[in-house]
Image: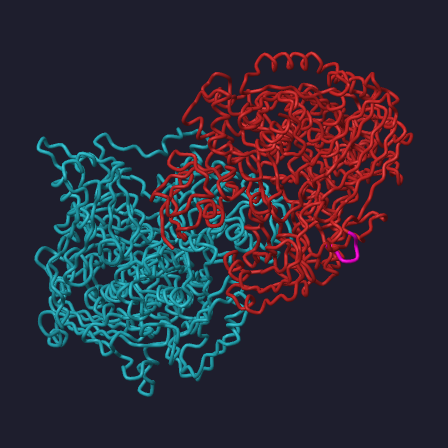
Chain colours: A cyan, B red
Amino acid sequence: MIQKQIIVNGVPHNIFVDQDTSLAKVLREQLHLLGTKVGCGEGHCGACNVIIDGKLTRSCIVKMKRLQENAKILTIEGIGTPANLHTIQKAWIKHGGAQCGYCTPGFIVSAKALLDENPNPSRDDVRNWFQKNRNVCRCTGYIHLIDAVVEAAKVLKGDIPADSLDYKLPADGHIWGIDSKYPRPTAVGKVTGTLKYGGDLSLELPPDRLCLVLVQATVSHANIKSIDVSEAEKMPGVAKVITHKDVKGNNRINGLAFPTNKGDGKDRPILCDTKVFQYGDAIAIVAAATEAEGKAAAAKVKVDLEPLPPYLSVPAAKAPDALEIHPGTPNVYYTQKHKKGEDTKPIFDRPDVVIAEDTIITSRTPHMPLEADCAFGYINDEGEVIVHSKSIGVHLHQLMIMEGVGAKKLHIVCNPMGGTFGYKFSPTNEALVAVSVMATSRPCYLVFDYHQQMQYTGKRSPFYGTVRLAADKSGKLLGMETDYDIDHGPYSEFGDLLTLRGVQFMGAAYDIPNIRGEGRAVCTNHAWGSAFRGYGGTQAQLISEIVADELAAKLNMDPWEFRYKNVHRPGTTNPSGQVLDSYSYVEMMEAIKPKYEAALKKAKAESTATHKKGVGLACGSYGCGLDGPDSSNAYVELHPDSTITVCTAWEDHGQGADMGAVGTAHQALRPMNVSPERLKFTWADTRNPVSGPAGGSRSQVMTGGAIKAACENMLAGLKKADGTYYTYKEAVDAGVAVKYDGTFSVPGVPIDENAIGKPFMVYMYGVCLSEVTVELATGKTVVDKVTFNVDIGKVNNRLIVDGQLYGGVAQAIGLALREDFEDIQKHKTMLAGGIPYALDIPDNIEINYFEYPREFGPFGASGVGEIPLCVPHPSILNAIYNATGARVKRIPANPERVLAALKEKD
Amino acid sequence: MIQKQIIVNGVPHNIFVDQDTSLAKVLREQLHLLGTKVGCGEGHCGACNVIIDGKLTRSCIVKMKRLQENAKILTIEGIGTPANLHTIQKAWIKHGGAQCGYCTPGFIVSAKALLDENPNPSRDDVRNWFQKNRNVCRCTGYIHLIDAVVEAAKVLKGDIPADSLDYKLPADGHIWGIDSKYPRPTAVGKVTGTLKYGGDLSLELPPDRLCLVLVQATVSHANIKSIDVSEAEKMPGVAKVITHKDVKGNNRINGLAFPTNKGDGKDRPILCDTKVFQYGDAIAIVAAATEAEGKAAAAKVKVDLEPLPPYLSVPAAKAPDALEIHPGTPNVYYTQKHKKGEDTKPIFDRPDVVIAEDTIITSRTPHMPLEADCAFGYINDEGEVIVHSKSIGVHLHQLMIMEGVGAKKLHIVCNPMGGTFGYKFSPTNEALVAVSVMATSRPCYLVFDYHQQMQYTGKRSPFYGTVRLAADKSGKLLGMETDYDIDHGPYSEFGDLLTLRGVQFMGAAYDIPNIRGEGRAVCTNHAWGSAFRGYGGTQAQLISEIVADELAAKLNMDPWEFRYKNVHRPGTTNPSGQVLDSYSYVEMMEAIKPKYEAALKKAKAESTATHKKGVGLACGSYGCGLDGPDSSNAYVELHPDSTITVCTAWEDHGQGADMGAVGTAHQALRPMNVSPERLKFTWADTRNPVSGPAGGSRSQVMTGGAIKAACENMLAGLKKADGTYYTYKEAVDAGVAVKYDGTFSVPGVPIDENAIGKPFMVYMYGVCLSEVTVELATGKTVVDKVTFNVDIGKVNNRLIVDGQLYGGVAQAIGLALREDFEDIQKHKTMLAGGIPYALDIPDNIEINYFEYPREFGPFGASGVGEIPLCVPHPSILNAIYNATGARVKRIPANPERVLAALKEKD
């Protein structure tokens, strides 16, 4: 240990530190300045940015010994506070810069350093600065961050007045609608670093908290012969070493398998007992006073394994000699048939049809939220096990883990989350924390490092998919045949659901009267499959949109013409045989046409011998909801201080549940003239009304609907005879209720064995145009521009939907070109996982809204989160083809794959 | 555990707490808002004040379950920051409101609550508010705090401009002198709560820190038969249970005994081995992950004791059948003879002399700093044991504990301290922490609760003292005889020194040509004796000033007349036979005369049948330094950023070492024209130059002298031929040194066996007039006014010396009337210990400076800290007598004792 004096935010601190400790750790764990976040922990993401003696620095990679005596450190806490926001923070709020908010302190510190150095930066200067300093934002797609910095600079220079950054409520007081940039309720907490995330709250637990350190498998498949914790339990600081023997329940996550699943869905152990199924599987948990003690003890746990062959791909797991990964359940454990219309074989056999067919492999995409997985738990004074995590399905996860952990009463609560993008649709750490809390009777926390985040949370499962499309000579689609396997990793939870999504969204944009297909969920030993924005639709539509392009080529039709001819028009039905809730494709296609043509011209003109430019199109859709019937619940409650709680279990993982809830309630309560600050969002909790998970873009529709219903009940209940509304006191005095429930459900029809039904009553639609440049020598592809026409119904709040769409497009670019988790060792970092940096995302992204109101959406709204992961990425793949004539058939279309395709073509 | 949402300083926090935990603990240990201090921990002192939903609240006694959901809490961190001070904080700085600073956040929060409620308070309103809300300040005497609140209110109301609170450097740039109210360098950190004290820094140690919990004796005297830690060591969270067997050295504090001491001074065990010597003695230390775990384990340590009779007073310990508390050393272990001038027996036998004699017992006074004792330690990367504590003698304590703990290299460093008033002249926890650090190789901290502070730190030792004074009929003193025992508790460290102080200061104000006396240090089983402001002079002069008053009465002289006749005049010598360094008594006496006479008149006029008013006088002095020769060292160093380190080991326990060092250096460097902000004070550290302890009012003289010398060397070294001075760069380029040492020593002469010599080369002098009201029915005494004329040489900084003097007078009032630690169980709290609250101290305190420059003081300065504990308290006792005719002969003169004296008189 050493002593050092440092000046933090102008305050001198004498600190006593291990000189090899990082500054970030010292700031957070010793000085408790929790605004400085740790993302990757290895200097790849900038969440931990601070300014040291005037220089922007990633504090996670600065060891204390490198700090000069009396170093002056500026953290987010020194830039501005909720009561006294810095101009940059105000600009960040105005431009919706904070979505999940986890990168926000690091970005604002970075922007401060930039503006200190260059008070008048161009957009390129800002982007280059963020690139150079490795500031990663996974939510926004960067554009609005650059907007914020540029506008903050103008205010700081005095070019524009300071109050241009303030939100101004319109005269009529509304905050709902496409013109509304009302800032989300959590914005101030995010830009000031005062909103506490799971890892922050873990450090605020009472002093008797225990740090959980996992003993994890370092092989992908093995039998467990023995686990010996005796030595580990004697290590200093260890409260307990927990194994499957300490689990009071059946030690299995309940994957809620479909009845037609060949497994029972209870194949995932909480703590491995008989087998290791994938790299990183948790075998034991050390609960210790400190992380260092936990790690030292974890190293002493002896696990005797009998290695088994690891099946890391669909072909390997399907090989005839492959063992059953879960003995008793075949590795191909679920099959989804698809039959719509006539049998397709006669159609494909017709001599006058034009057929295209291709097989595409999608990536095992890592979600790469800035915040690694984290959770904590405790036993409350009622004896209930309480787990706080990044769950985006609190009631779902409660159901999935209760029996496994063996708790009589267990609740799951959402922390503010630094992004999930869907991986937390699966429980990750909840059961581990619950088991530890129950075994130790003490508060416990489990914070993953980024390698654990990469290697031991679910991923988007790869599809090995073949699509055949048949059209008549005019280009009218006649039929589709599909066949695909999904590498779902070792755990079956939602593997059946994902397989179903394949048939629901392959070719979904088009009127295809006749479809036959089959998808299969396959068990492997690679990373388990979990939801990711666009779940299934992402993979399905990549395959079908590539084949659609190929069919257009075979037809000698322009891809736009081919698509325009086939997109849905009133009366046509989607792959589930359902009429659409919005026939907006034609308008969106027509609107994109001139842009498409101009882009083609431009690409042709600007292509050189070394750099080829190209233009690609794609269409697509995604459903909002769970399959078939869906419902949600909420209540609103008026309080003595005139605030109104909008209580749901709408999980906020950065997408904007806070604003969704408040915006919807505000619109619904307009007759009562409630100012927006009076509406209080609640963090999701299983003790709140059951709202269903925040996935599948269902929440604005379903929980928004429930909120609207609750508000309508409140309006009816509080309305006085004279048309005005009771105050709290008046209501209580008059014996009138102040709390009103609301329920909303949609008349969905579950799909039948052939995948026909009404799985979603609300959909989102999109048409995307991408323009790319491919460097022939390297295969490196740059996306120059994306134009995305979307129909997400009526818009609740512009900042929120912009955030979802621009950010989603950025993720689609990453998905198309960069992101991968195939090599378990290599891809364990954010950088190697291919996270897009500022220069990987163009400044030129254009989102155009086509507001077709939805019957079942509150005030006509649909969802939004999935659609940008369903349409743009195929358009990029198609643009690469358009630029080069080379067809990349596996994503990411990284330089190696593009180069290989270029070679194959030649 | 429960979950609660609270809004702290405008920021919402979800917290997870044990509902029986105090809010203070949650704020500090979970939210790390360390500005909220914990003083007494039981609601007696207000250091932990916060505002909850608008109401001032002592957070140490608010259990979390009592907090409303969404309670709004304002802490010092929410009031102002170093960069953005609140008006109250500015006023606090201007008026020198923060001395040790430990009570400051609680006071400022309290003042905020008051001004929120009453924007225009009178002085009485403020004082009553602080009384009602139990805000205790142990340093200032309250007056300047009231000044600050009243002026802040004026600024807040707009009655006076805001900048009236700002310090303005005079045109010539000086900050030295009686006109200077330059704020002390630590003021901003103190008023904002950002200066970290030992308990705060303990919470900022790395996560592997261990909390030390003591196993303490609950009897006062016993043989130890066995200590069994086996069960305790198995308790959760325990890293180690440490006993004397783990101590690597000789397990004894080295008390640095005088050669004539009958003991060797090595009688105090670090951890008890063979015997328990006093209540609270440390028998074992549990080093655990958390305090709760440490306490649980400490309860499992089994100590088998053989009880011995406890000797809790001098008579008990001197009884013929009393055991030797330290076998082999007599309980009366040190005797100090005093012989000045002629033998006194013939004088006292003369028929023409008037004699007064009395025996007075002084109190075992508890220091009651707001901050309980605390320390932490670690082993640094050089393998040295580093202990950070409230030591006010770092090099002294290094010497005292090194051999005992058995460390090869050990350093002691000062934390910012919430007051010591001298108790930390003795090591308390340093050896315990060092032993623990060495036994565990981990950072360890030990923070006492207030009961431990009261029961297990040193106290001012009671004197059982008889003084006989003889004067001729004209009132001229002819001789003095003294005889006293000191109950020094079980540990001899400095017991010999304290005994010496008795003979040095009994009758010290007067020209007494002939003195014979003897004092004895007695070992008892009550709390061990440690330094306290006025050390020895406090007790000695109480006894002799009472007897002086009695002699005046016998002479039928007015007490002023008697004193005026006998105070020193040029050429007379003090009890050590030394001519004075300043003959200011005559002027001070003459100056007080009209006030005294007016007071007498007023008292007579205002006395009623039930309430008697009276007026008392006292004179006194104290030395500045250690005995005999004394020296100190310092260096000053110019840095590239033009700052200059003023490096010493001048310990700052709130008295103002920061300002002492900076003010002295600034004055010495005036030719270089250094702005005060460039001068950087250093916290004391054994790696700094040896400056000697910060006790005995020696530091401004000795270390001030060393600083002056170092600065003069710097001036000489950096002066260029043209009369200007090198900058850092110029100096380095020219090969000129930038670091300059300075040493200062005084030509003291150690006292001889008869206590004759030149123990101090600089003294302080004072004359005090007190006016009291005694309620006859209850014996309750109120001090109405104190007028204190002091000669402390030239004043460095007015805020500092005012702070010492007003605060010292307040302590003298407490000493005279309230403070006690006689009943080990009853007196274990701040409240029961008699700490003075706001209404116990009059608003009417008048300090008058008589600036006689000192030959050996830098720029003529003397010390200041001890003098207010040497003079005012006898004047209060004399005033009680003057009011009632009843003589109280034991302090504190609490109502019971005054009543008893009234009865005895009747």
Q: Is residue B161 magenta?
A: no
Q: Position of residue B106 (x, y in %)?
A: 51, 36
Q: Name the one closer to the observer, A5 or A799.
A: A5
Question: Which x, y percent locates residue B747?
Answer: 88, 34
Q: Residue furthest bottom?
A: A321
**Residue located farthest toward the front when viewing the structure as drawn:** B906
- Residue at x 53% of width, y 75% of height: A231
Name the quarter where the N terminus of chain A is drawn. Answer: bottom right
Q: Which residues are magenta?
A: B325-330
- Determine the image quadrant of residue B835: top right
Q: Is residue A358 visible?
A: yes
Q: Residue at x 57, y 22 (%)?
A: B843
Does residue A892 appear in the picture of this structure?
A: no
Q: Is residue B339 left or right of residue B408?
A: right
Q: Nearer the viewer, residue A601 or B169?
A: B169
Q: With respect to residue A324, does B521 lie above or below? A: above
The percent coordinates of residue A884 (x first, y second) are 35, 62
Residue A215 at x, y = what percent? Answer: 46, 71
Magenta span: helix, strand or loop, mainly? Answer: loop
In the rendered image, which quarter is residue B419 located in?
Answer: top right
Q: Nearer the viewer, residue B319 or B424?
A: B319
Relative side of A6 to A260, left or right:
right
Q: Is residue B326 magenta?
A: yes
Query: Is the residue A161 above or below the residue B257 in the image?
Result: above
Q: From what the image shows, is residue A472 above or below residue B778?
A: below
